[in-house]
Amino acid sequence: MPTLQDLVAYCDNRTRRSAYKDAPGAFNGLQLANPGRVTKIGAAVDAGVIPFQQAVAAGVDFLIVHHGMYWDMPRPLTGAVYERVATLIGGGCALYSSHLPLDGHAELGNNALLARQLGLAPERPFLVRDGEAIGRIAAYTGSRAELRAQLERLYGRVIAIEYGSETPAAVAFCSGSGNSAMAELVPAGVDTLVTGELREEWFNTAQEQKLNLYLCGHYATEVHGVKALAAELAAHFDLPWEFIATDNPL
């Protein structure tokens, strides 16, 4: 039976955790240990009392999340913060968080997987931070109407803001919040962005700079990386795994 440290070492190496200069609150890596034994892997987008309860109820003792527990720390271990920690410790469930490493990874990252689910090759780096690409750009040969239809089939609700080319030559991908991507589209020679969400004021920018923007949901665009890492980890260590889904519409 693999140990907790076996799984942590694999995840750290596979995601290239140390290569990414993330926000301090991301605290990528092992955020909470368990007694050291792992029998089932889980994957979830967010740290929270409810997904933690669901994971423990499913028998998960190693949970991978994209958004970890420590964004707004330090905080006293009271209320919901206490409930989070108590749920994991009581259930013997370790918590592993991977934020930017699971956005930017060339194989397991949300953005590479967003491109590939559309049948595109995520060949160009985008949103380079401290030498590491967080987003991806893929060449595109279809129409924006075809792109919109593909995204609607995959995600259901898609907000489409279309002022760019009707036949974009390339598509940029930025999972989750796309606010940081907006200023880098034109310099990158791209007028089309697939992302999760944007602030309201970017609508005017899209009109002025003639951009196509497709907003598919922050949560929905960030399920891919944790699923891919959990599936690969489970196969490597011959363990079961489960995605802990929530009804997050954002």
Image (cartoon, grey):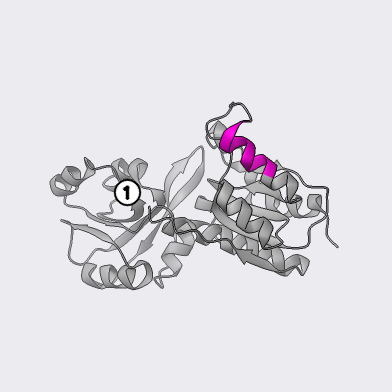
Q: Residue lying furthest front in this view?
A: 79
Query: Image point 17% across, 47% down: which residue?
Result: 209
Residue numbers of the magenta segment: 78-86
Q: Quarter holding the N terminus?
A: bottom right
Q: Is 184 rendered above or below residue 250?
A: above
Work out which residue is located at the far right of the displayed protein and give it: 1
Q: Can residue 231 be seen in this snapshot?
A: no
Q: Nearer the viewer, residue 174 or 60?
A: 60
Q: Quadrant of residue 43?
A: bottom right
Q: Position of residue 161 (x, y in %)?
A: 20, 56
Kind of residue at badge 1: Ala
Residue 233 spot, x, y in % from top left:
69, 62
Relative horizontal placement of residue 116, taking residue 159 as reference (left or right) = right
Rate crowding at label 1 as few (under 14), some (14 to 19) or many (20 or more) other CA atoms within 10 Å: some
Q: Based on the picture, tell me whether residue 83 belongs to the magenta stretch.
A: yes
- Find disc 1 in the rendering and name its residue: 188
Picture coordinates of residue 191 (x, y %)?
A: 24, 54
- Secondary structure predominantly adopted by residues drawn in magenta: helix
Q: Is residue 120 left or right of residue 158?
A: right
Asked if residue 220 lies in the magenta stretch, the reply is: no
